[in-house]
Image (cartoon, grey):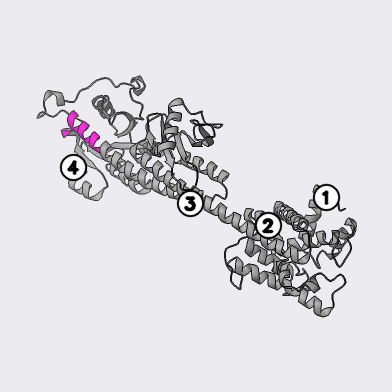
Amino acid sequence: MIGPAAAEDANDDLLFADESSDSDAPDRHRNPPWLILIVDDDHEVHAITRVVLGDASFENRELRFLSAYSAKDARAVLAAQRDIAVILLDVVMETDDAGLTLVRHIRDSLGNRQVRIILRTGQPGQAPERQVIAAYDINDYKAKSELTAQKLYTATVAALRSYQHISVIERGRQGMEAVLEAADHLFAQPTQARFYEAVTARLAALLPQPGAVLLCADAPAPGAPHRLSTASTAANGPAPALPDAAQADVRATLRDGLPRWTDGHAVVPLRNRRQAPHALCVLTDTPLPEVEQRLIELYAGKAGSGLDTLHLLERLQEAQVATVHALGKLAEYKDEVTGDHVKRLGRWATAIAHELRARNLFTAELDDEFCGMIGLASVLHDVGKVAIPDAILRKPGRLDADEMSQMREHAAIGGSILRDAGGAGAGGAGERNCLTMGAEIAESHHEKFDGSGYPHGLSGDAIPLAGRIVAVADVFDALLHRRPYKKAWEVEEVLDLLRAESGRHFDPRVVDAFLTVLARDGLPQVA
């Protein structure tokens, strides 16, 4: 057991007193206490340790003691408490090497390299210091006979300081990984609305303690920040309103682009080049440590870059949409087909894609991107007709064999034009976009499910799904409306054709989905 040291002065003597309850101590510190685990089979050791260190504090945080009277008990405590800072560990308990075995369990089985372990033994012969220090990952070794009050305090504070430094380094490492992972998530958001939701939610998840995160930008009314979106880890429901002091700091940060840190909130600018000034406001109950401040600033920098990237992507998408519509209008002009046809075609194709997805069909292809893209891409289905002579396109009667052969070339021509424009190679490799999907549609929407179509005689699932969908929608809409070479059909006639050609011309799954869409949304009214 711990004994007094004769060589120390009176202030360094060990003092014995009744063990006091942790719950009796007043809450003098806002910060959480350091957890100290005492592992010893001698109850008096626990009592003396609490008396000697009971009033101690480090970095404005008091000490809270946990007790285990065997290595087995200690394992249970360590499993329940992952943030223990220091373990005061006896060697000889239920077995002669129970303490040393526990050290191996902590370091190897639990993988806990942060907790500081001070070995205290009343029988140094059972665990010689030199051998133990060399063989076990412990941080200090004390014989109980030499452990005075001052030495116990010094050893504990030194262990806490070491634990603090290691925790800061580990928190920084984990925080960096989390920031980089969160940045990847932000860069994957397709719209500003989704980006705003993600930027606050991800920062809230990064915080070491519950809090609310608000993304703020200049409001139309001068002097008042506008809360774009919020995320809170504190509770379900909306985050609290910005206090007056936080609002003032948000306004200041939006003006000068400088971060501000206080006990109750932090405001960090979201620096970007192309958007109005933004700032992240974090509402906290305690001041944020320096490592958290650095991580939040790093995150805000990544988020600002993400906002710039999203802006550029949106401009690129707008340019691509404009290109698609320009090409579609060119084909309409050549073919004397009204723009209403491609609009209706896009709506039908989109509705069919969503219905197929609702049925869990083609799950490898029918993702959000496909469903959001097919309506626009379908505009390009007949773009290859720009290469077909007007005399053939506008001929009022049936085409002869040679004219039909030339007309059929528009599918391959359209696929080639759009594939090159979309950056895909001859084999169709490359990133999917409206132009590359348009190339698939242009080249395959005249293929037939039984293999009798053109230009390549593809059959079944070898025909791209986008082409199979547009084939049904295109034939349906084309037959319902007058063309230079034919009269408009009645709706029931067209539906009968779709049913008759299901499995021959058309993919039966697509036909069935389209019929469901028409039954749900209503048949079109044709003048």
Residue 132 forms part of the magenta stretch: no
Q: Secondary structure at mark 2?
A: helix
Please report the residue visible at 51 percent of the width from the left and 40 percent of the height from the top: 201
Label 1 SS: helix
At mark 3, the secondary structure is helix
Measured Cα–Cα span from mark 1 to mark 4: 89 Å
Instruction: Report the span colored magenta.
Output: 146-159
Residue type, label 2 = Leu
Q: Earlier in the sequence, mark 3 or mark 4?
A: 4
Secondary structure beneath label 4:
helix
Which residue is tagged 1?
519
Circle 3 is placed at which residue position? Answer: 184
Q: Which residue is mark 2?
A: 376
Q: Nearer the viewer, mark 2 or mark 1?
A: 2
Q: Nearer the viewer, residue 425 or 163?
A: 425
Residue at which label 4 appears: 125
Mark 3 burial class by Cα count in 10 Å: few <14, some 14-19, many 20+: some
Pick the residue in front: 131 or 415: 415
**Badges 2 and 3: C-beta atoms under 8 Å apart?**
no
How far across and how far down the image is residue 423, in percent? Answer: 58, 67
